Image (cartoon, helix red, strand yellow):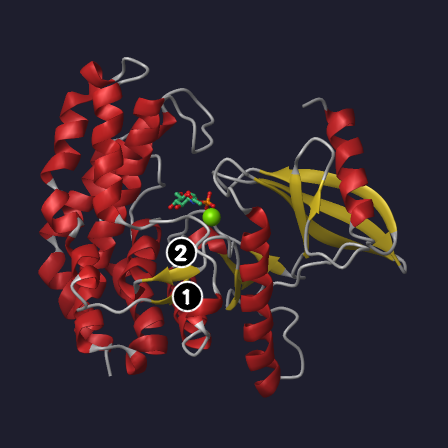
Amino acid sequence: MIKEKEEQQIKEVCERFCLCGEYRSYEIINSGHINTTYRVYYFRNGELKDYILQRVNTYVFRDPVSVMDNISSVTEFIRAKIKAKQATAKRNVLHYAKTCEGDYYTFMDDGGFWRCCRYIDGSVCFEYTDDLKVIEESGKAFGEFQRYLQDYPVEKLSIVIPHFHNTVRRYAAFRDAIAEDAEYRVADIQADIDGYLELEEIATKCYRMQREGILPLRVTHNDTKTSNVLFDADTHEHLSVIDLDTVMPGLVAFDFGDAIRVAASTSAEDERDLDIVALDIEKYEAFTRGFVGEVSGALLDAEKDSLALGAIAMTVECGMRFLTDYINGDKYFKIHYPDQNLVRARCHLVLAKDMIAHLPEMQEIVKKYCK
Ligand code: GN1
Ligand code: MG
């Protein structure tokens, strides 16, 4: 979109949220694969105040009002817990702005669904990091999130994306895409396809254990990548978990595992040079120390035993979703160059295989930190 038009739209959306002060400027934040995100600057009482404005992707989130109902309810729940132990929760949980009508969202005339939250002062976020302290802190952040929501009434949550981490169904969708081959891409990627099909048994194990009643459903975040945590810009201690769109009933192993997929990799999610893609066991240990230290007291033995397997499940599932989207013509994930989904998928396959090779070691590390 041309800049003037984009800015005009942003100003109009901001007006709906009755933000105090005077609009100054905006910048686009390019990190997510789904929603469109802006940082907006307002001038108030002699200083700049910033907000995060997002246009929610309604192709992915078909019922965005339910998404916001989940988010407002969960953030209120966490806020009350934090306020019971400290004076303010301002920097430790997201705070969404209400529109003049009292809603946490607004529909614009073009059908766009928007929301706005306060920017957390003095925070930073990392797309990728080698800093073990930051990785351990991200483990604490997601572990703490899990702990805060342990007594949240799960029946209150709407299932905003049905079967989101249903790895068995993800395999079925993958097979459907291959059979349809809508963009005639399948012939050139047979080795990648076979690579994913070979991992079906191990990748679907956690999901099957949930269906058999061995692993319980809890309130989980479901998108636990490192960039979904905010840290204090000076101390690098964790502040808050963000991107609560997919908070739904799920497996703890999947929150742990999806985080490991990103935090314990030697490379970015879309590394083209596969020779440098591997599991970094030190990073894995740092995240595990942080996460397990927060939650292990509340987990069943079967859940503790499933954590490392969850990393394999989430790495295979996410990589296969990228490959499915590539085959379907890149309709779901945002891409910044033509074969990015294929690059992401190849990178994930290498990482998943390396995890499989290190599974016993990964399981030992979980045990070491379990109380
Ligand atoms: C998407 O919101 P964002 O862009 O961080 C995706 C996750 C994937 C992730 C891969 C709703 O997350 O499931 O793990 O990309 N979110 C949705 O980076 O599909
Ligand atoms: Mg997300």
Q: Secondary structure at mark 2?
A: loop
Res 93 visible: no
Q: Quadrant of residue 80?
A: bottom right
- Give coordinates of residue 111: x percent, y percent: 66, 34
Point out the image quarter for the N terminus: top right
Res 350 visible: yes
Callout 1 crowding tier (Cα within 10 Å): few <14, some 14–19, many ≥20: many
Q: Which residue is under mark 1?
A: 142
Please say if 263 is above or below 137.
above
- Give coordinates of residue 243: x percent, y percent: 52, 54
Q: Would you say the residues marked 1 and 2 are in contact, meaning their CB atoms lie under 8 Å apart?
A: yes
In the displayed structure image, the side of residue 111 where residue 198 appears, left or right: left
Callout 2 crowding tier (Cα within 10 Å): few <14, some 14–19, many ≥20: many
Q: Which residue is under mark 2?
A: 224
Q: Residue at x 83, y 46 (%)?
A: 15
Q: Which mark is residue 270?
A: none
In the displayed structure image, the side of residue 64 where residue 130 appears, left or right: left
In the displayed structure image, the side of residue 289 where residue 68 appears, left or right: right
Please say if 37 is above or below 159.
above
Front one among 299 and 368: 299
